[in-house]
Image: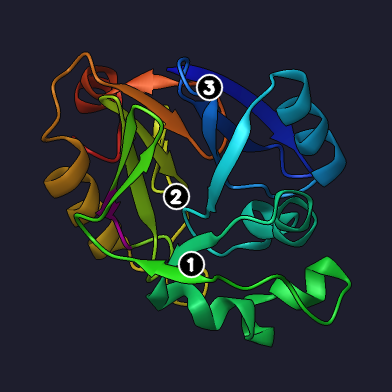
Amino acid sequence: MLLKKLEVGPFSANCYLVGCPQSREAVIIDPGAEGELIIEQVHRLELKVKCIINTHAHIDHVGANGKVKGAFNVPLYIQEADLPLFRSPQASVTLLSGRDEIAVPDQFVRDGDEINVGTLTVKVLETPGHTPGGITLEINGALFTGDTLFAGSIGRTDFPGGSYRQIIKSIKSKILTYPDETQIFPGHGPPTTVGNERRYNPFLS
């Protein structure tokens, strides 16, 4: 698996380029800002973008959707429950972006869906709590958790649609079921493992 992490925007959100070494087909996860940088890195790595997936619809993870989607003419996927966050002033997506419109999804994904990217399989796990439609992506045994789970912390639940009870349930029922050695690539901050979070994350004890 080819993996490139880019920290983008004022909130230092993690955008991931994940590719198949054989075909060079790739998925872009959470292009939140700095679209030109993301596009440049795709070309530098000689990747063939197949799709874009947002783990959730907060501005720091969707802000460059339009620019990146336009550059590669590929579909954009998200879980349907987060669609209102693209349109709701209360969610501050359009207000923070300074634009009237953010590129909205072409297709919705649901729990258990699988998307083939070359020899890679991207499996969708619904992990609501940070947002109603938050998802985690499993690729080659690694987990891309968006803002559901971080190294030593969890996603905020005080935004519209957030739920502390729900995010803890999502983590314990969907993420902590994986083996301890499973790598976790979160939406902010450094990578971690399931074992580290099971043992040391204060929110999960």
Q: Using residue 70 as the reference point, say whether residue 163 is left or right of it.
A: left
Of the image marks 3 and 1, the number of the one nearer the N terminus: 1
Q: Which mark is residue 158?
A: 1
What segment carries the magenta color?
A: 124-128
Q: Determine whether the residue tagged by mark 3 lies in a helix, strand or loop.
A: loop
Dot 2 amino acid type: Gly
Dot 1 amino acid type: Asp
Tell me the crowding category of disc 2: few under 14, some 14 to 19, or many 20 or more residues within 10 angstroms, Cα based: many
Q: Is residue 125 magenta?
A: yes
Report which residue position mark 2 lands on. 155
**Residue in the picture at 13% in, 21% down:** 179
Tell me the crowding category of disc 3: few under 14, some 14 to 19, or many 20 or more residues within 10 angstroms, Cα based: few
Q: Which mark is residue 190?
A: 3
Dot 3 amino acid type: Pro
Of the 4 image quadrants, the one containing the N terminus is top left
| Residue 112, quarter of the rendered image | bottom left
**Residue in the picture at 34% in, 62% down:** 129
**Residue in the picture at 29% in, 56% down:** 127
Front position among marks 2 and 1: 2
Q: Is residue 186 magenta?
A: no
Q: How is the image coloured?
A: rainbow
Q: Residue furthest front?
A: 23
Residue 118: image x %, image y %?
Answer: 41, 31
